[in-house]
Image (cartoon, rainbow, N blue to C red):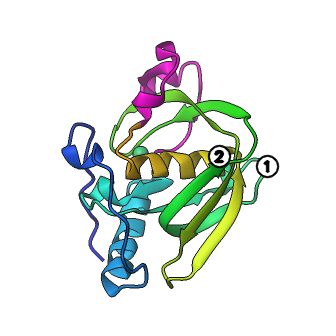
Amino acid sequence: MPILKIARMGHPVLARPALLVADPAALEIQTLAASMLETMEDAFGVGLAAPQVHVGLRLFCYRVPEARAGEEPPVPNTVLINPVITPIGDERDVDWEGCLSIPGLRAAIPRWRHIRYDAFGLDGAPVAGEATGFHARVIQHECDHLDGILYPERIEDYRLFGFDEELARIQPAAGADA
Ligand code: NI
């Protein structure tokens, strides 16, 4: 599978709401998802949404590596199609976030701490689950991509927005990009 070019902030594809995938089990979706997973791993990312590879469709891939899993078990490479998320409770966490479309930068972003997600898998079957902490954060970051939203739009404290290399002075190993 080819490694795909990742769109950077400013490209219009990142600002447009993506379209529903008509047939999650279609061969072209399998092919796209395989390339997205390879591209995500090549970029050392933890998430990648189709608009980030110039495809305006509602799917993304992600993973939760052991080092970031926290209170939940790690999550292997996963693809979610036409996802819908619902917050559970009203608790929010603020944590560092980066984005493969905004290389070199990072910010502290508030996200729902606990969510439910409903989506489809690559076999076309519905999948649903709950996620907390970092897992919930990655899913919310990727769902934002499907709505044309990048994390800077979520910043509440611009003092906690900066270059990775500089932030490493106060926050070593602030995390991976999605
Ligand atoms: Ni991103």
Foreground of the two, 125 or 46: 125
Check residue 122 for magenta coloring: no
- Residues at discs 2 and 1 in contact (Cβ within 8 Å): no
For residue 172, say whether it is visible.
yes
Residue drawn at 31 percent across, 53 percent down: 52
Residue drawn at 48 percent across, 79 percent down: 122
Q: Which amino acid does label 1 sit on?
A: Glu
- Residue stretch rendered in magenta on the structure: 151-178
Residue 76: quadrant of the picture: bottom right
The residue tagged 2 is 134
Q: Which residue lies furthest to the right in this view?
A: 71
Q: Which amino acid does label 2 sit on?
A: Phe
Residue drawn at 33 percent across, 73 percent down: 32
Q: In this view, does 110 lie above or below 49?
A: above
* Number of numbered discs overlaid on the protein picture: 2
Q: Position of residue 79 (x, y in %)?
A: 50, 69
N-terminal-most mark, 2 or 1: 1
In the displayed structure image, the side of residue 176 where residue 38 appears, left or right: left
The residue carrying mark 1 has its beta carbon less than 8 Å from ligand 1: no
Q: Where is residue 164 in the image (x, y as percent from the top left)?
A: 44, 29
Q: Real-space Cα distance between discs 2 and 1?
A: 9 Å
Q: Position of residue 56 (x, y in %)?
A: 28, 59
Q: In this view, does 99 lie above or below 129?
A: above
In the displayed structure image, the side of residue 85 where residue 15 appears, left or right: left
**Label placed on residue 71:** 1
Residue drawn at 51 percent across, 18 percent down: 160
Q: Quadrant of the N terminus?
A: bottom left
For residue 178, say whether it is visible.
no
The kind of secondary structure element at disc 2 is: helix
